[in-house]
Amino acid sequence: MTPSPGPTFTVTVGQDAGVTVVRAAGQLTDASAPLLRTQLRQLADVPVLIVDVSDLVFWDSAGLAELVEAWRRSRNTGTRLMLAGAGPHLTQVLELTGLHTTFEIHPQVAAALRAAAQSRQQPADERFGPA
């Protein structure tokens, strides 16, 4: 019997309430990370970017590195980058690495969309807090 290769990795990009949402699903590994990198680089100049990780079943350090790189780019371009849907394993990794204080994390996309909508109602200098 041959072992199952497991879920493949997919990235889809869409708009929800005027906000760009990138949905990553499957296994985010060193083999699939370039696909995520390509998509995130193409979106480097959007005002708000939500990365929905709720359908990731596995990710390794390469996947984490891609998210950190996206965060760095977002700081340089002024994009508000949010992670949504991090499960218990990913949350634990973010906490162990200290990245839970780096990323803006929401339990699901809907919560991130609400946060984005609320910030649009605030004056620009109050949106992102201290640098």
Image (cartoon, rainbow, N blue to C red):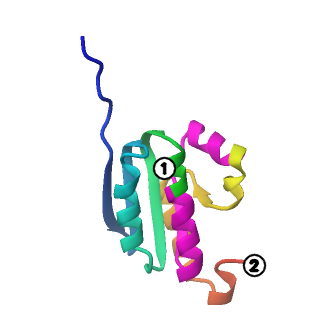
For this orientation, the residue located farthest to the top is 1
In the picture of the structure, the residue carrying the numbered disc 1 is: 63
Residue at coordinates 57% horizontally, 42% vertically from top-left? 90
**Residue 17 is at least partly visible in this image:** no
Helix, strand or loop for disc 2:
loop
Residue 20, given in percent of the width and then of the height, sits at 39, 70
Which mark is on residue 130? 2
Q: Picture quarter containing residue 14?
A: bottom left
Q: Picture quarter containing residue 115?
A: bottom right
The residue type indicated by label 1 comes to: Gly
- Foreground disc of the pair 2, 1: 1
Residue at coordinates 62% horizontally, 84% vertically from top-left? 122
Residue at coordinates 46% horizontally, 50% vertically from top-left? 53
Rendered position, 37 above or below 41: above
Residue situated in front as seen by the camera: 110 or 56: 56
Left/right placement of residue 88 relative to residue 55 reads right
Residue 59, given in percent of the width and then of the height, sits at 48, 41
Which residues are drawn in magenta?
A: 66-95
For this orientation, the residue located farthest to the front is 30
Rendered position, 85 above or below 18: above
Residue situated in front as seen by the camera: 49 or 17: 49
